[in-house]
């Protein structure tokens, strides 16, 4: 859980400085840590292979759309994980995916 909180803290710090590169790196580490904690080797392998292209795509969208980094920090998801509330965590992930799809459209 400390790793996830550290990632959120790094995202927050990067957002306050407007540092997109550090923000995305911390965000990707956050997601990788969740996947690793789930003990799902297939997801770990898939995420590892797509990290570079995911990084580039997210960066391009954030720059092109002038995304407010502070609004992209996953506070709610971390809270749901802490509370072991799988329904809420799933809801936050699904909302994030829908939002991400809209940004890529």
Image: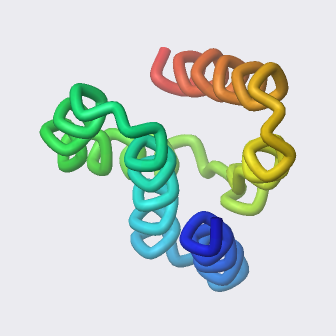
Q: From the viewer's perspective, is residue 14 above or below residue 36? A: below
Residue 76 percent coordinates (x, y): 83, 46
The quadrant of the rendering that contains the N terminus is bottom right
The number of numbered discs placed on residues in the rendered structure image is 0
Horizontal arrangement in the rendering, residue 88 relative to residue 34 (left or right): right
Viewer-nearest residue: 93 or 71: 93
Q: From the viewer's perspective, is residue 6 above or below residue 100? A: below
Regarding residue 99, the answer to whether it shows in the image is: yes
Horizontal arrangement in the rendering, residue 68 relative to residue 101 (left or right): right
Q: Which residue: 34% across, 32% down?
A: 40
Q: Which residue: 72% across, 80% down?
A: 16
Regarding residue 15, the answer to whether it shows in the image is: no
Residue 90 percent coordinates (x, y): 70, 22
Furthest-left residue in view?
Answer: 49
Viewer-nearest residue: 81 or 76: 81
**Image quadrant assignment for residue 80:** top right
Q: Which residue: 60% across, 64% down?
A: 4
Q: Which residue: 45% across, 55% down?
A: 33
Residue 81 percent coordinates (x, y): 74, 45
Horizontal arrangement in the rendering, residue 84 relative to residue 47 (left or right): right
Horizontal arrangement in the rendering, residue 80 relative to residue 30 (left or right): right
Image color mode: rainbow
């Amino acid at each position: 859980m400390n790793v996830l909180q550290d990632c959120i803290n790094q995202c927050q710090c990067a957002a306050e400085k407007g540092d997109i590169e550090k923000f995305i790196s911390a965000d990707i580490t956050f997601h990788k840590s969740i996947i690793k904690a789930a003990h799902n080797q297939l997801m770990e392998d898939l995420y590892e292979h797509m990290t570079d292209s995911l990084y580039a795509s997210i960066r391009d969208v954030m720059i092109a759309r002038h995304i407010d980094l502070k609004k992209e920090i996953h506070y709610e998801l971390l809270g749901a994980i802490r509370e072991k509330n799988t329904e809420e965590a799933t809801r936050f992930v699904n909302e994030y995916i829908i939002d991400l799809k809209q940004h890529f459209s």
